Image (tube, rainbow, N blue to C red):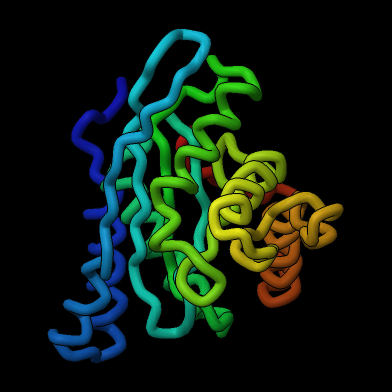
Amino acid sequence: MENTNHDPFSEVKKHIIKTAENLGLSDDKIEKLLKPQYVRNHNLKVSTKFGEEVFNAYRVQFNNARGPFKGGIRFHPKADESEVSALAATMAIKCAVVDIPFGGAKGGVVIDAKKYDDTDLEKVSRAYIKTFLPYIGVDVDIPAPDVYTNSKTMAWMLDEYEQITGVSSPGIITGKPISIGGSKGRDIATAQGAVFVLEQYIETTGRSLSGLKNCHSGVW
């Protein structure tokens, strides 16, 4: 049975508080780690094969103390402010842990992408950029793919951004096709990272791969 009371952001905040207290951080510093700098929520009005529709869309910019906001955009029917905020917070933490000069952000559109063709998904993608463009930029916030978005989605978004601004700005989007400035290996980078972590774990602990179990967490 689905847990309708699950609150992803509350869960993330519990982990942040526990870790911060173990590190001896002051209450005021902990407080800064618990609140996103900006929570942006807008409606996207799009004409699809089903008619005129309105999709709720989010961009949570959690923290940019270490550099521009950075994080993916997901298209999912269960996307909401809590989930997007939780992912934005963990993005900020991940970048800090591995010393990457970016902050954390995340975006989402409440849509069941599997029900729409590329024509409609392109319209939604372009509407998202058109709506959130004032808050996106190479030195401000850099989106990327996430659940049910990919390099094609990023190409649409980049094109929309450049059409509106009239400036070539390949750096405002990552995860785009290699042909327009994307990075080789981006499509397998997340899975490859998991392999590297597993290899390091085995080397550090001396355990055998045989018999190990793993747990997957996420929304699909």
Q: Position of residue 100 (x, y in %)?
A: 58, 80
Relative image position of residue 21 (x, y in whole percent): 23, 82
Judge by depth and name the residue closer to the eye, 84 or 24. Answer: 84
The residue furthest front is 166
| Identity of the residue furthest to the left in this view | 27
Q: Is residue 80 above or below residue 27?
A: above
Quarter residue 207 falls in: bottom right
Q: Quadrant of residue 150?
A: top right
Q: Is 139 rendered above or below residue 211?
A: below
* Quarter of the image where the N terminus is located: top left
> Of 11 and 34, which appears nearest the observer?
34
Q: Is residue 212 left or right of residue 60?
A: right
Which residue appears at 71% of the width and 45% of the height? 151
User: Which residue is found at the position 54% from the left and 52% from the top?
Assistant: 164
Q: Nearer the viewer, residue 67 or 210?
A: 67
User: Is there any visible trace of residue 151 in the rendered image?
Assistant: yes
Residue at x-position 64% and y-position 64%: 167
Asked which quadrant contains residue 103, the reply is bottom left
Query: Taking 28 as reference, is 188 above or below it?
Result: above
Report how many numbered discs are placed on residues in the image.
0
x and y percentages locating residue 86 in the rendered image: 34, 55
Which residue is pictured at 19% across the width and 35% down the height?
5
Residue 77 shows in this picture:
no
Q: Which residue appears farthest toward the top when viewing the image?
A: 50
Which x, y percent locates residue 197?
A: 68, 66
| 24 to the left or right of 168 | left
